[in-house]
Image (cartoon, rainbow, N blue to C red):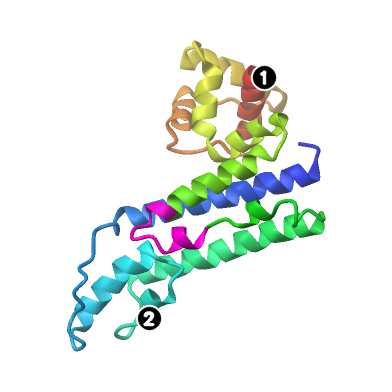
Amino acid sequence: MDNPAAAELVAIITEYHDLRQVYAEALRFRSQPVSDQLPDDSNVAAWRARHDVLAVQKPFLPTFCERRGNTYSEGQELAMEFRSRYAIARRRLVDYYYLRGQARSEKNLLLALRETDVTAASGDGILAALDRHISMLARTLPPKDHLRIRLAIDFPNALLEARGKMTQLQAVKEVHRYLAVYRETVTLDSYKGWEAGRHVPQGNNRTAAEEFIRARLG
C-alpha cells in the first residue's frame, strides 16, 4: 500500500479487530446472568464473583472494577485492560481524523460505542458496536484497500478463498513461485496450518503468501 493515510487507517481497523477478539474471548467465560440480589456486605467472595463477571460485561462502568479484597479479580483485570486498549485505539482514531481536518465530516465514525452499547445488560452490545464500527471504517477506504484489511484481520479465509478450486498442494507450489527469489520453501503442513489459523506465516513466507493472494483476488 503506497498511501500512508490508508495504511494508517488499516492499522487502526486492525487494532479495533484485535481488541474485539480479545473482548469476545474474555466475555466467552463471563457472559452468565448475575442475580439482582446483592450479596451480604461481609461476603467478600460473593462480591468478587459478582464484580468479576459484571466488570467484563460492562467494562466502561467503573463500579464493577472496584476492588473487593486484597486484589482485583481476573475478570476485573481483563475489563481494565480492554478499557485501556480501547482508549488508546480511539485516541489514535481521533488523531487520524483531526490531523486530516476531517473530524467534523467523520463525526459518526468517532462515536465508536454509544452509551446504550456500553451499558447493555450483556457484552453482546459492545461486540455488535465494535463490529459495526469496523465495518463503517472499512467502507471509508477505497475498494483497492479492502484486501489489505482482509490480509490483516482474516488471513486464513483470504488464503482459502484465493486457493479456490486448487488443491492445497497446488497452492503450495504457487506460493513457492513467489518464494523462489528468497531461495526458500514452505511445507504442505505449514500451509495447512496457515489456512486453519493455527499459526500465521512470518517474514518471507508471509510476503509470498500475500503475493499469491493478491494475484488471485486482487
Q: Which residues are magenta?
A: 114-125
User: Which quadrant of the figure contains the C terminus?
Assistant: top right
Neighbourhood count class around disc 1 (C-alpha, 10 Å): few under 14, some 14–19, many 20 upward:
few
- Which of discs 1 and 2 lies nearer the camera? The answer is 2
The answer to whether 202 is drawn above or below residue 218 in the figure is below
Residue 129 lies, in percent from the top left, at 49, 51
Horizontal side of 202 relative to 103 (left or right) equals left
Number of residue marks: 2
Residue under the point 26% across and 72% down: 50
Q: Is disc 1 placed on a helix, strand or loop?
A: helix
For residue 174, what is the image quadrant? top right
What residue is rendered at 29% in x and 57% in y? 31
180 w.r.t. 26: above or below: above
Q: Quadrant of the N terminus?
A: top right
Please state if 175 lies on the left or on the right of 190 as rendered: right
Tag 2: amino acid: Glu
Residue 15 is a magenta residue:
no
Q: Which mark is residue 66?
A: 2
Q: Tell me what residue is drawn at x 64 percent, y 56 percent.
A: 110
The residue sitting at 46% across, 68% down in the picture is: 60
Nearer to me, 79 or 157: 79
Return the x and y of residue 8 as percentages of the image width and height.
Answer: 72, 48
Q: Which kind of residue does numbered mark 1 sit on?
A: Ala
Residue placed under numbered mark 1 in the picture: 215
Callout 1–callout 2 Cβ contact below 8 Å: no
Element at label 2 = loop
Give the mark nearest the N terminus, 1 or 2. 2
Q: Which mark is residue 167?
A: none
